[in-house]
């Protein structure tokens, strides 16, 4: 993952700001650093209202992260706009439509993580 927590948190803040700018809903930051089976240091989770909104949220994250020199190692689901995953290694951004977020329940799957609610739906 990253060398410093500060740098990683700055990336989280950049992603969160990008989501807030496009009116992302129910944004949550999950700190996974103490979770044994974690695949990343942090998850940023957000809900969009439609496929186009989810795609716009993803584009905003990609644009803002690129401005700070970050290119994702993987991105999935942008064309469909139901669940987008953008992997930056130390943080993974998940953008869902509400029904997909309710179905997959990442917050419940990673229940040992520390949660910070950034915004409500």
Image (cartoon, rainbow, N blue to C red):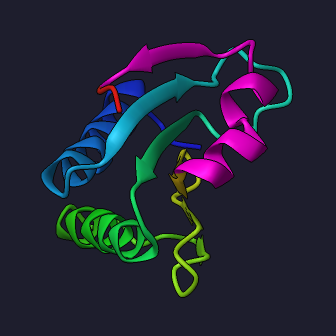
x then y, percent, for residue 96: 54, 55
Examine the rendered structure and indicate whether residue 34 appears above or below residue 45: above
Single out the residue that lies furthest toward the bottom.
Answer: 79
| Snapshot quadrant of residue 71 | bottom left
- The quarter of the image holding the N terminus is top right
Near-viewer residue (56 or 87): 56
Near-viewer residue (36 or 52): 52
Whether residue 107 appears in magenta in the rendering, the answer is yes
x then y, percent, for residue 56: 30, 72
Magenta range is 98-118
- The quarter of the image holding the C terminus is top left
Examine the rendered structure and indicate whether residue 23 appears above or below residue 42: below
73 vs 14, left or right, is right
Examine the rendered structure and indicate whether residue 11 appears above or below residue 110: below
12 vs 72, left or right, is left
89 vs 4, left or right, is right
- Which residue is rendered at x = 31% and y = 25% of the image? 118
Single out the residue that lies furthest toward the right.
Answer: 37
| Snapshot quadrant of residue 54 | bottom left
Near-viewer residue (94 or 87): 94
Q: Total of numbered circles in the picture? A: 0
x then y, percent, for residue 19: 27, 51
Near-viewer residue (3 or 106): 106
x then y, percent, for residue 47: 44, 48
- Which residue is rendered at x = 45% and y = 28% of the image? 29
- Which residue is rendered at x = 26% and y = 37% of the image? 13
Whether residue 83 appears in magenta in the rendering, the answer is no
- Which residue is rendered at x = 20% and y = 45% of the image? 20
| Snapshot quadrant of residue 43 | top right
101 vs 53, left or right, is right
């Amino acid at each position: 993952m990253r060398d410093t927590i500060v740098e990683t948190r700055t990336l989280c803040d950049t992603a969160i700001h990008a989501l807030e700018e496009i009116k992302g809903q129910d944004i949550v930051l999950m700190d996974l650093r103490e979770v044994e089976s974690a695949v990343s240091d942090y998850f940023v989770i957000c809900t969009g209202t439609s496929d186009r909104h989810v795609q716009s949220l993803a584009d905003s994250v990609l644009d803002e992260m690129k401005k700070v020199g970050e290119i994702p190692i993987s991105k999935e689901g942008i064309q469909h706009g139901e669940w987008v995953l953008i992997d930056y290694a130390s943080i993974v951004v998940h953008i869902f439509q509400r029904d997909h977020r309710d179905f997959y329940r990442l917050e419940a799957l990673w229940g040992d993580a520390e949660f910070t609610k950034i915004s409500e739906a």
